[in-house]
Image (cartoon, rainbow, N blue to C red):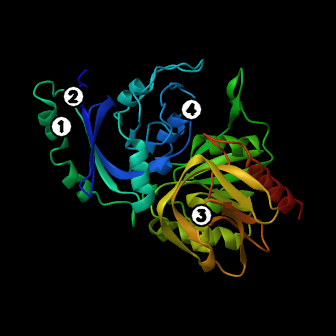
Amino acid sequence: MTAPAPTACLALADGSLYWGYGFGATGETVGELCFNTAMTGYQEIMTDPSYAHQVITFTFPHIGNVGTNSEDDETAIPVARGMVVRWPVTEPQNWRAAKPLADFLAAHGRFGISGVDTRRLTRRIRDLGMPHVAMRYSDAISSGDIDAISATLSDGLVEKARAFAGIDGADLAREVTCGQSYGWTEGRWAHGTGFGPAPEPRHKVVAVDFGAKRNILRCLSDAGAAVTVVPATATAEEVLAHKPDGVFLSNGPGDPAATGEYAVPMIRGVLEAGLPLFGICLGHQLLGLALGGQTVKMNHGHHGANHPVKDLETGKVEITSMNHGFAVDATSLPAAAMETHVSLFDGTNCGLRLRDRPVFSVQYHPEASPGPMDSYYLFERFTAAMDAAKAG
């Protein structure tokens, strides 16, 4: 039996071409290609602002069986530019499913490609780094032989991949941050009730939004914080004007050195005020820069929900969720800062804290959306730091 003609093509800047079958909205896109090893949570991954300007290859072959719903979005619309999967997207088989994945993507103008050898693609990314890519999906090409259809789908895509500006040097936080400050009061999800109000808050926290995921804000609320979210470009004076008991630096996309042009002065102003401070992901990298450290672009980054991280102070190992393509160079940190966590995959820095002040950060995602809940204690640690600061 002859295979059906392809409807989509993925082109790498090195000239490699992969054909498959599109789902979602027809169209074209460009981005940086990464791979994610999570077995579920694709809706949360696609709507994670940290994936701005990226296309995601899912190493798990069966994507779609959980479906999508109105509760699991991490921001209002998908931010990742596309997805690549091995097998055709499966129909939802989950009790929370409200819409198939393909329909969810189509409603938001995004698309994916199935039928691609994702193992081969993942090896390519692992060995040679995250390539620039272009994708096209068209269901209008219905006549001609497969070779002719494939040529039409791929026409000009390699050149578009090569023309993509990339993420190095790009300040993408401005693209995904909120337009104005707002308050957040919703707590974490519970079986039978969904998302509900958080407990009565004990502290005021300003969360600087470099691309914050909703579940991070829920975790802060659940840990006892009345959260005010401010844009990434907020100054130290604007942050401190809210009279917070602590400041949180969120995750986000792009090159931390570029975002640091305006974020580092803000963070240094908060540090001078002596407030408890907690950062994750991009917030962790920006704190490292504010302390005088440096960040580096990784070969293929960390993207998944199964990353082992060692706490150097306790010796415990946590299984964590990660999504980052840059890392703090631990050797560049000043003596006042100590490395607290490292990746057991490659030894890269995954955490730091100041020795004499309640200031700490981690590279991974303790809100675990998707992923394990090993690291939720970090939100409680932040709350405890604010308790201690108030007690004097």
Do the CB atoms of the residues marked 3 and 2 lie less than 8 Å apart?
A: no
Q: Label 4 amino acid?
A: Asp
The image shows residue 62 at horizontal and vertical percentages of: 49, 31
- Quote the CA–CA distance across marks 1 and 3: 39 Å
- Quote the CA–CA distance across marks 3 and 4: 31 Å
Q: Residue furthest front?
A: 1
- Viewed as shown, does residue 4 lie left or right of 288? left
Q: Is residue 179 visible?
A: no
Q: Residues within 10 Å of mark 3 (few under 14, many from 20)?
A: few
- Which residue is depicted at the point 32% across and 56% down? 132
Say which element carries label 4. loop
Q: Label 3 amino acid?
A: Asp
The image shows residue 6 at horizontal and vertical percentages of: 24, 31
Q: Dot 2 corresponds to which residue?
A: 5
The image shows residue 362 at horizontal and vertical percentages of: 66, 59
Q: In the drawing, what numbered circle is on residue 132? A: none
Q: Label 1 amino acid?
A: Ser
Q: Quadrant of residue 23?
A: top left
Q: Dot 4 corresponds to which residue?
A: 72
Q: In the drawing, what numbered circle is on residue 150? A: 1
The image shows residue 202 at horizontal and vertical percentages of: 81, 47
Q: Dot 3 corresponds to which residue?
A: 346
Mark 1 or mark 2: name the one nearer the start of the chain.
2
Disc nearest the viewer among 3 and 4: 3
Q: Residues within 10 Å of mark 4 (few under 14, many from 20)?
A: some
Mark 1 or mark 3: name the one nearer the start of the chain.
1
Q: Residue furthest bottom?
A: 335
